[in-house]
Image (spheres, helix red, strand yellow):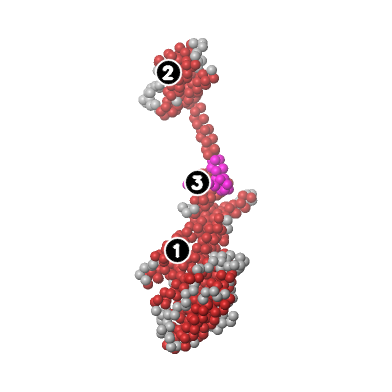
């Protein structure tokens, strides 16, 4: 239906476009919230003007549209008739009361358009495939009209009128948000960005920017989880300006009103939280991006290892270091992954065992810190475990070889003692007698002479009972305690050199081998 649009004054330079046809949402507010009569603030000041009289005619038509039992089609027709009256009232506003008349008419026009949009919404929510074009278009037209009326009325309307229209603007915006949340993500952002430009500067605009930023953030989290870090970064980069502008608006409101209300304090807190969360996810996404670049270059280099370009190698290292620094102390997983690849570069290309071990070790520490979360299926974790295990095995073999060489040198110095032990090792009793005669511990001896005598008596008997065998085993265990390498080598002897301590330790090891053999024979019997 064609509508006559209001004229705009030279003061405001505003024009009223034709109403687009459009659609709505799947949920509606209670009718009691929307059937309030358009506010007639300013009528007393303009009661004699033609614009005020025309506006009152529009109010009567608006009341007729909201009578109970009226079919939706007739209701919409009457609302459109009321809107025509309000447009005519705005177009006929002139003279000293022009601003009051124009802002009042446009406010009522916007409220009526909002009520019409709610009717469209009820009709469209019955259609599951609806795109809500009509209701969205009507809601945006309503929001635009009320925003223009609010800006025009700032200098001429009373405070109660301004507070009322601010409530209506916020309510209309929330209706639009409700419908936008039902759209596809791309279309949702298109609609929300259009709406935020229609809102007047203030708390509602700050709220709208928060909602857009929050939608960007949630979209970025989903994209991050699916590995689409480039699209994730696009969303995260869009949040900063929205949050800063919203915080700036709230700061101005706080300064003008000497503080924020509880509702706006909550919004300020939400904006600060969103800002911090965005910085965290931005670092994570940038870390992932840098690591993926390094991984791609590393894979190409390992496939073509015959032509090694060190400049490219250092570029790869730089990518992984950048990934590490971006995620450091923010995201354990990304930090550990970057360290794993730094270890791989040093292992496969730079052949720096010290750096390789350092990177792999730190990666394992971060994995432990991230528990109970596990990364068993991640490539970077598997290569870290494999590489670190190789280094540990190589170090263990090297240490064992060094210890073997050192032990062989000591054994050569103990040739006489070892030969005497071998000669005495004809029986357990002979061995015990020899070692406690020539190599008895100087302190804390467990096996006494009485134990030796008892052992000899049991050993001389051709057949021993089970109790006798258990007694012999216990005596051998006391000898184990006396000659255990850790205890035997730890006892100090006056004027003993380090070389003497090594010999005593090796000697105790040889004695323990012989005692263990006799103990095993007793168990077999």
Comparing 433 with 44, the one in front is 44
Quadrant of the image containing the C terminus: top right
Q: Residue at x 44, y 80 (%)?
A: 40
Quick check: 50 above or below 431?
Answer: below
The residue wearing badge 1 is: 271
The residue wearing badge 3 is: 372
Which residues, given as a range, are shown in magenta? 369-391
- Say which of marks 1 and 2 sits in front: 1
The residue wearing badge 2 is: 436
Q: Give the image location of residue 142, x and y in percent.
A: 51, 75
- Main secondary-structure element of the magenta-colored stretch: helix
**Nearer the N terminus, badge 3 or badge 1?**
1
Q: Judging from the image, what secondary structure is the residue with disc 1 in?
A: helix
Are the residues at dot 3 and dot 1 in contact (C-beta closer than 8 Å)? no
Q: Judging from the image, what secondary structure is the residue with disc 3 in?
A: loop
CA–CA distance in space, label 2 to label 3: 54 Å
Q: Give the image location of residue 10, x and y in percent.
A: 48, 85
Answer few, some or many: residues within 10 Å of disc 2's Cα (few below 14, many 20 plus, some between 14 and 19): some
Q: Give the image location of residue 165, x and y in percent.
A: 45, 75
Q: Residue at x 49, y 48 (%)?
A: 370
Comparing 319 with 221, the one in front is 221
Q: Give the image location of residue 52, x and y in percent.
A: 46, 85
């Amino acid at each position: 239906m064609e509508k006559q649009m209001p004229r705009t004054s030279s003061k405001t330079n505003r024009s009223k476009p034709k109403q687009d046809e459009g659609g709505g949402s799947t949920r509606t507010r209670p009718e009691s919230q929307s059937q309030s009569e358009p506010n007639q603030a300013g009528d007393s000041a303009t009661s004699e003007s033609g614009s005020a009289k025309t506006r009152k005619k529009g109010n009567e038509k608006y009341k007729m549209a909201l009578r109970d039992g009226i079919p939706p089609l007739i209701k919409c027709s009457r609302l459109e008739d009321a809107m025509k009256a309000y447009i005519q009232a705005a177009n006929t506003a002139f003279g000293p009361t022009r601003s009051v008349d124009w802002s009042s008419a446009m406010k009522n026009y916007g409220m009526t358009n909002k009520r019409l949009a709610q009717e469209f919404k009820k009709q469209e929510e019955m259609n599951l495939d609806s795109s809500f074009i009509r209701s969205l278009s009507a809601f945006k037209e309503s929001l635009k009209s009320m925003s223009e009326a609010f800006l025009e009325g700032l200098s001429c309307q009373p405070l109660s009128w301004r507070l009322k229209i601010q409530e209506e603007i916020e309510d209309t915006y929330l209706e639009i948000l409700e419908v936008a949340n039902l759209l596809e993500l791309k279309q949702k952002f298109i609609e929300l960005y259009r709406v935020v430009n229609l809102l007047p500067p203030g708390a509602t605009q700050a709220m709208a920017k928060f909602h857009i930023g929050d939608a960007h953030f949630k979209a970025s989290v989903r994209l991050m989880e699916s590995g689409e870090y480039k699209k994730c970064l696009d969303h995260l980069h869009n949040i900063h300006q929205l949050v800063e502008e919203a915080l700036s608006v709230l700061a101005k409101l706080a300064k003008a009103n000497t503080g924020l209300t509880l509702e706006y304090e909550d919004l300020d807190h939400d904006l600060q939280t969103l800002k911090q969360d965005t910085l965290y996810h931005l670092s994570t996404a940038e870390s992932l991006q840098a690591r993926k670049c390094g991984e791609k270059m590393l894979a190409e280099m390992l496939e073509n290892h015959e032509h090694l370009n060190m400049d490219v190698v250092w570029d790869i290292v730089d990518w992984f270091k950048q990934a590490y620094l971006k995620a450091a102390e923010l995201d354990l997983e990304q930090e550990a992954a970057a360290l794993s690849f730094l270890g791989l570069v040093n292992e496969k290309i730079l052949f720096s065992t010290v750096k390789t071990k350092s990177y792999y070790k730190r990666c394992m520490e971060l994995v432990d810190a991230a528990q109970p979360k596990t990364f068993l299926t991640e490539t970077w974790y598997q290569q870290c475990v494999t590489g670190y295990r190789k280094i540990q095995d190589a170090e263990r073999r090297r240490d064992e070889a060094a210890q073997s060489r050192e032990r062989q040198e000591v054994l050569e110095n103990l040739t006489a003692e070892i030969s005497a032990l071998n000669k005495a090792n004809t029986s357990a009793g002979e061995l015990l007698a020899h070692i406690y005669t020539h190599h008895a511990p100087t302190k804390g001896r467990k096996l006494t002479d009485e134990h030796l005598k008892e052992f000899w008596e049991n050993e001389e008997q051709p057949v021993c009972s089970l109790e006798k065998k258990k007694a012999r085993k216990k005596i051998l265990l006391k000898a184990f305690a006396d000659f255990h390498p850790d205890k035997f080598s730890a006892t100090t002897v006056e004027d003993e050199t380090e070389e003497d301590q090594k010999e005593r330790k090796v000697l105790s090891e040889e004695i323990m081998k012989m005692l263990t053999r006799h103990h095993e024979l007793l168990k077999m019997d």
